[in-house]
Image (cartoon, rainbow, N blue to C red):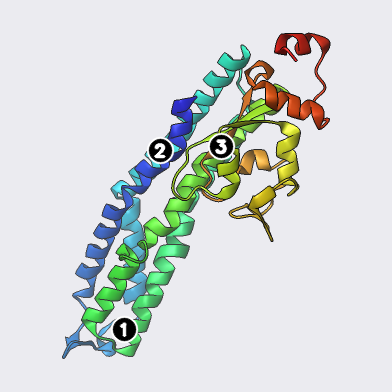
Amino acid sequence: MANRINRLITIPDEFVNKLPSVQRKMFLKIVERMNAVKVVDGFIVPTSVSDNFVSELSDFLHNELLDSSYTDSVKSFVSEFDKQKDLTQKYYSSEFNTDAVSAIGDRAVKAIKSEVVESLITDSVKTDFLKPLESVLNTSINSGAGFNETLKNIRDFVEGNEQVDGAILKYSKQLAHDSFANSDRAYNSAVADELDIEWFLWAGGEIATTRCFCLQRHGKYYHYKEIEAWGRQEDLGDCRTDNGWAGMKRGTNEKTIFDYGGGYECHHTVAGVSLFSVPKEDVQRNIDNGNFEPTEVELRLLGL
């Protein structure tokens, strides 16, 4: 399972790390087109720019993205969703000695993959990159702004600076991490439902930005009723905020928490485990709180 868990961070990161070079190429393409703009004494002459200049530049950049290594990177990233699903199948087949193929899970992964491709190549490119870029260009051109200042503003937007990420990286980073983890948890949840699994390990990678909710649960075992309680915003302890917990995804409830995990940019999953993989103290805790009623055979085998 370690490889599967590590991939929740490494696979999105591999995709994200390719984006600065994409942003650089886009900026250089813009500079080439901006050479057509007339400049007098360092300032743009608005009347020298055609009415269609900005929209044509926007269309040109979109086509460049579609024909560039960016699209190949998106396709390569999305192909990893199926590999992650295969690792989940192998884990459950081994842990529970059964066929862990889920048609419901397959459909969920397929839907998420389609959404990711549509968003990264079409929707978010237009909403978070091209439209704001058009606004920057129109404002600069119509006001006759300084040419060098305009290029700096464009560069800061496209490539970013020390304070902020570039536009493509900014919208893609969270989307990549969230979609990959959501796909993993969706298939995991579907298999767990079909196998009637009661016990789970809150598993994932700890990074500098890991929030209180996941830090307190990382590497620990829980009965599904405990996890459902968190989805109802119960038993949150020190991690409670006015809106549940920091980073909690809107729509989180006792059912969706198995898909949403700790929320935005959460790299954890709830991996189903057999009863006999659970530490005795965790089993006893759930016997005491009424979540779990073991059979006499289970009690003897557990040594409780």
User: CA gap, disc 1 to disc 3?
Assistant: 52 Å
Amino acid carrying label 3: it is: His
Mark 1 neighbour density, 10 Å: few (under 14) some (14–19) many (20 or more):
many
User: CA gap, disc 1 to disc 2?
Assistant: 40 Å
Front: mark 2 or 3: 3
Q: Position of residue 76 (x, y in %)?
A: 38, 38
User: CA gap, disc 2 to disc 3?
Assistant: 20 Å
Residue contact at pointers 1 and 3, CB within 8 angstroms: no
Residue contact at pointers 1 and 2, CB within 8 angstroms: no
> Residue tagged by mark 1?
141
The quarter of the picture where residue 110 lies is top right
Indicate whether 246 appears above or below 222: below
Q: Which mark is residue 218?
A: 3
Amino acid carrying label 2: it is: Ile
> Residue tagged by mark 2?
11
Of 10 and 288, nearer the camera is 288
Of 193 and 236, nearer the camera is 236
Q: What is the residue that sits farthest to the left in this orientation?
A: 41
Q: Position of residue 156 (x, y in %)?
A: 31, 69
